[in-house]
Image: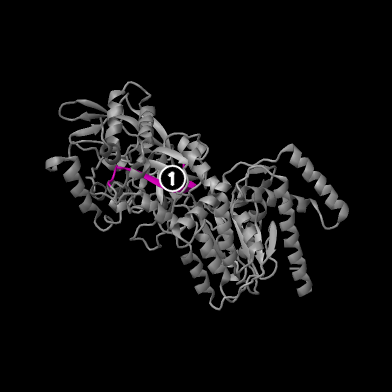
């Protein structure tokens, strides 16, 4: 029986064994998937698999099993590859069948050639995704994830021997010649070629038994911009947010790729491919002057950005992939499963929900300078999520405009840092004339390079977006600035972002929690405006906010994080009896004050009641929670009216 080291360090040897036993059976691929699925179900087995999110690529063994938590930033064109191919020994004429799945480079031993005309050759299709780490992933999340991993062992640090062989892939119709310039080989590609050919493909320096690779390496189009270090333009990994770190990967999916879409968050388990041979092959193709222009229809820019160096953008050949409900490592990966451990986790946490909520309310009250009403609404905002869409209307979104924020003390900056410690992914958007005019908010299709250029609003579901209007000054928005403000408004109102495809725009639905801080009423739309009434004016805002975090135990912080993520995933319903009572109550409110109570007020009160119930761990609306929602809304409106009277104009 294979040991742990086999399926972790040498997954391809496991695949080879299953393939050899089932050559005549087309179900061998399904058996491979089932084998690894069962292995990963064993106790903590997923934690044994090194993660590209936490371990640098150069510490990982090529062709080992890795995992990667990522967002699909772009999708490439489909790619054909040799699923099964046959080699012929030039001396003995012995024929051997090989599998091409989970590989970039075909296996070709000394004195072997691939028979491209063999009747045994099976051509299959795979899809390539360009994936990046989840944008805005919080630092605490990464540290917590690292704690789940063992330190990289010597097996992961050692590098495998590269071998020059034909690639198993080629593109449909276009004969694209990809080049992958490994940064270590750009200076001396011919020297590296001689070294690798002498060491791996043909022992003793005899190269007559090797297939010339340059005509066989062809890969599908990809929407990615990575430029070789020896080129003049700077390296761009196409991350949506500035300052992001972590690897970008070409994720090659073999089954059910139609179930995934752009911006999905995935966790993939697959074979790591960082073979430097690809750099040699592609370098030859780029330098060749004999290529027929009709064979290579891709532009130079497209070739350059679609085939980044494998050392910088590794490939993962996916064995298993799943779309994640959430990315909080403190929760079970899937809460829909009726597993005993999952049910036990949820029930145990729900039993202590009340004190956790009370502590979180106290923590946020201090963060909001003693304003408990604003803290209540902030909790409701943080657990809100789009749970359904009715026609074009997203149900469950709860954008809060926190007005009355002090400008001089960088209050929003410090508040964001606290929120960042509570949620898995977030981004602080400092709204200024310069940022509006010069930033790219919406992704745009670059047809020259055939890729999707990322934008600030290309975010994963349930990302917390904090927009700071307190730094906004007078100035003129140019055309780009107007488009960016419009994009923010559409995101808030409709929970969608219109990606720019030059000749048309395509709507991509999203689920982003937006919190807007401002001095007066926000320029942007919101579902609820809460005017901040500070009870405390700390002399040193930074010191005050920092002391709040240091005063909270790490175990308590983790409970806050579980609380906010778990409640967002709970189901919720309203009984017919309560629905009828709410309707009667609304009619009565309209009778008493027809001008100030509108349908929008009812919708907002129902939202507040929904999130109040969930915040207390209740999945149905009770009369008590409905009355509490009405009370909170009355207090919020009274505060706004009071502020309006003080200022003499509407906020």
Q: Compared to 508, does 12 lie above or below?
A: above
Which of 357/60 is in front? Answer: 357
Residue projecting furthest to the bottom: 539
Q: Residue at x 81, y 53 (%)?
A: 598
Q: Residue at x 22, y 29 (%)?
A: 88
Horizontal side of 475 relative to 286 (left or right) equals right
Percent from the top left, x then y, of residue 594?
A: 86, 54
Q: Is 636 within the magenta?
A: no
Which of 507/367 is in front? Answer: 367
Q: Is 65 within the magenta?
A: yes
Quarter-wise, where is residue 12 in the image? top left
Residue projecting furthest to the left: 204
Which of 40/472 is in front? Answer: 40
- Colour scheme: one colour
Residue designated by label 1? 297
Quarter-wise, where is residue 116 in the image? top left
Q: In this orientation, does residue 385 appear?
A: no
Percent from the top left, x then y, of residue 28?
A: 35, 26
Residue projecting furthest to the top: 24
Which of 146/526 is in front? Answer: 146
Q: Which residues make up the magenta segment?
A: 61-77
Tally of numbered discs = 1
- Is the N terminus in the top left, top right, bottom left or bottom right quadrant? top left
Dominant SS in magenta: strand
Q: Residue at x 33, y 54 (%)?
A: 56
Q: Residue at x 28, y 50 (%)?
A: 152
| Mark 1 element type | loop
Horizontal side of 231 relative to 112 (left or right) equals right
Percent from the top left, x then y, of residue 643?
A: 74, 70
Q: In this orientation, does residue 236 appear?
A: yes
Q: Residues within 10 Å of mark 1 (few under 14, many from 20)?
A: some
């Amino acid at each position: 029986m294979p040991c742990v080291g086999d399926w972790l360090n040498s997954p391809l040897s496991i695949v080879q064994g299953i393939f050899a036993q089932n050559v005549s059976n087309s179900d061998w691929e399904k058996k491979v998937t089932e084998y690894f699925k069962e292995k990963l179900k064993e106790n903590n087995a997923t934690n044994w698999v090194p993660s590209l999110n936490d371990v640098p690529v150069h510490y990982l063994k090529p062709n080992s099993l890795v995992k990667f938590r990522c967002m699909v930033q772009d999708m490439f064109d489909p790619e054909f590859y040799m699923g099964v191919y046959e080699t012929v020994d030039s001396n003995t004429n012995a024929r051997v069948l090989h599998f091409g799945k989970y590989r970039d480079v075909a296996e070709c031993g000394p004195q072997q050639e691939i028979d491209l005309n063999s009747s045994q050759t099976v051509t299959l299709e795979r899809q390539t995704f360009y994936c990046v780490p989840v944008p805005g992933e919080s630092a605490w999340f990464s540290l917590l994830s690292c704690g789940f991993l063992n330190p990289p062992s010597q097996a992961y640090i050692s590098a495998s021997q590269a071998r020059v062989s034909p690639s198993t892939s080629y593109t449909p119709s276009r004969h694209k010649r990809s080049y992958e310039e490994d940064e270590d080989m750009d200076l001396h590609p011919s020297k590296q070629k001689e070294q690798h050919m002498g060491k791996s493909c043909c022992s003793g320096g005899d190269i007559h038994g090797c297939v010339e690779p340059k005509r066989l390496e062809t890969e599908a189009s990809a929407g990615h911009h990575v430029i070789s270090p020896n080129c003049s333009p700077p390296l761009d990994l196409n991350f949506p947010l500035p300052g992001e770190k972590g690897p970008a990967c070409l994720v090659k999916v073999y089954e059910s790729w139609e179930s995934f879409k752009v911006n999905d968050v995935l966790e993939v388990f697959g074979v790591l491919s960082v073979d430097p041979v690809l750099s040699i092959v592609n370098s030859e193709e780029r330098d060749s002057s004999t290529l027929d222009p009709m064979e290579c229809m891709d532009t130079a820019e497209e070739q350059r950005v679609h085939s980044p160096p494998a050392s910088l953008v590794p490939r993962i050949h996916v064995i298993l992939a799943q779309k994640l409900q959430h990315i909080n490592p403190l929760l079970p990966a899937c809460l829909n499963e009726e597993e005993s451990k999952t049910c036990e986790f949820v029930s145990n946490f729900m039993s202590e929900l009340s004190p956790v909520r009370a502590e979180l309310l106290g923590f946020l009250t201090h963060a909001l300078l003693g304003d408990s009403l604003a803290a209540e609404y902030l909790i409701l905002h943080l657990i809100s999520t789009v749970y359904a869409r009715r026609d074009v209307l997203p149900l469950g979104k709860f954008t809060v405009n926190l007005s009355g924020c002090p400008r001089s003390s960088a209050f929003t900056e410090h508040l964001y840092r606290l929120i960042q410690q509570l949620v898995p992914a977030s981004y602080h958007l400092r709204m200024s004339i310069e940022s509006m005019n010069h930033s790219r908010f919406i992704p745009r299709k670059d047809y020259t390079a055939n890729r999707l250029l990322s934008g600030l609003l290309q975010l994963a579901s349930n990302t917390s977006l904090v927009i700071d209007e307190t730094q906004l000054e007078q100035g003129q928005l140019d055309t780009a600035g107007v488009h960016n403000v419009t994009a923010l408004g559409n995101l808030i109102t409709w929970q969608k972002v219109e990606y720019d495809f030059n000749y048309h725009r395509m709507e991509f639905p999203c689920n982003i929690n937006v919190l807007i801080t401002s001095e007066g009423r926000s320029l942007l739309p919101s579902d609820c405006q809460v005017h901040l009434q500070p009870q405390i004016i700390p002399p040193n805002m930074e010191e005050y906010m920092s002391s709040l975090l240091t005063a909270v135990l790490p175990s308590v912080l983790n409970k806050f994080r579980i609380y906010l993520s778990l409640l967002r995933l709970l189901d919720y319903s309203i009984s017919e009896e309560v629905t009828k009572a709410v309707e009667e109550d609304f009619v009565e409110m309209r009778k008493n004050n027809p001008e100030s109570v509108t349908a929008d007020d009812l919708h907002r009160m129902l939202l507040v009641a929904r999130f109040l119930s969930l915040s207390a761990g209740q999945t149905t609306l009770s009369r008590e929670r409905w009355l509490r929602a009405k009370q909170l809304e009355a207090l919020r409106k009274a505060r706004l009216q009071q502020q309006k009277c003080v200022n003499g104009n509407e906020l």
